[in-house]
Amino acid sequence: MQLRYATNLAVDQYIDRKAWRDAKLDYCPLHPKGGCRFAKHGTYPRKFPDGVKIARWYCPDGSATFSMLPDCLSSRLPGTLVEVENIINQIEKSSSQEAAAENIRLDISLPSALRWMRLRLFLIRLTLTLLIDLVTSLGDCQPTVSSFRSVLGIEFVLPRLRMLASPYLDILPPPLGFGPRPEAKKSKKYHYQHKTGTDPP
Ligand SMILES: [Zn+2]
């Protein structure tokens, strides 16, 4: 289970200070009254960015692991929220998704780059749309990064939204929230095609 490690450290500062050592989880989220064998369970590394570690706890009685994700990092996607925000911002400013892809991912083919970008765009647009409904102070925003930036008056909105959305993180999709990744249309289409393909004529 992912939990929020509230910190305004940028990822470089988080790594330099080894700030995962300062993460605190005072009681077991499954047994807040105590009585279980909840204990610190070391750290685990993330591949991106290099050097990042996440503090972890474990409750053997609930067979559950709890990791404290700092506000700078994406959940269920590699890298940071600022990196995701930069991608969405580039897509919003580009004349087309194809044009944006040429600036964002030169290392992979165009179809792969578009798929990579569209997953992030889909997840962030959905998250921003939900937040407009959930958080009163965001009610005047449009579901774009540029609109959230101008309403909040800050350069990077996603790390701040991790904070503003903290009561809703369990229901919001990644990379901002800690909820499940929603089924994209593509997988439904796949199931549909698969079904029709295997049905007898
Ligand atoms: Zn417990």
Image (cartoon, rainbow, N blue to C red):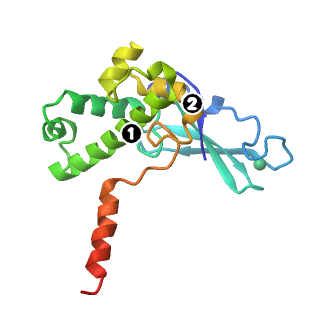
Q: Mark 1 highlights which residue? A: 126
Question: Quick check: 185 above or below 4?
Answer: below
Q: Mark 2 highlights which residue? A: 166
Furthest-right residue in this view: 35
Question: Quick check: 87 above or below 182?
Answer: above
Coordinates of residue 123 in the picture (x, y in percent): 37, 42
Residue 155 appearing in the image: no
Residue 20, by quadrant, is top right
Question: Quick check: 3 above or below 13?
Answer: below
What's the residue at 79%, 41% (across, down)? 32
Q: Residues within 10 Å of mark 2 (few under 14, many from 20)?
A: some
Secondary structure type for disc 1 = helix
Identity, as a three-letter code, of the amino acid under mark 2: Ser
Q: Nearer the viewer, residue 177 or 69?
A: 177
Q: Quadrant of the C terminus?
A: bottom left
What's the residue at 75%, 43% (across, down)? 28
The reply, left or right, for residue 150 in relation to residue 96 is right
Furthest-top residue in this view: 153
Coordinates of residue 66 in the picture (x, y in percent): 64, 45
**Real-space CA distance between mark 2 and mark 1, rounded to the nearest whole angstrom:** 16 Å
Question: Quick check: 118 above or below 61?
Answer: above
Q: Nearer the viewer, residue 107 or 65?
A: 65
Identity, as a three-letter code, of the amino acid under mark 1: Leu
What's the residue at 23%, 30% (across, down)? 92
Mark 2 / mark 1, whichever is N-terminal? 1
Residue 106 appearing in the image: yes
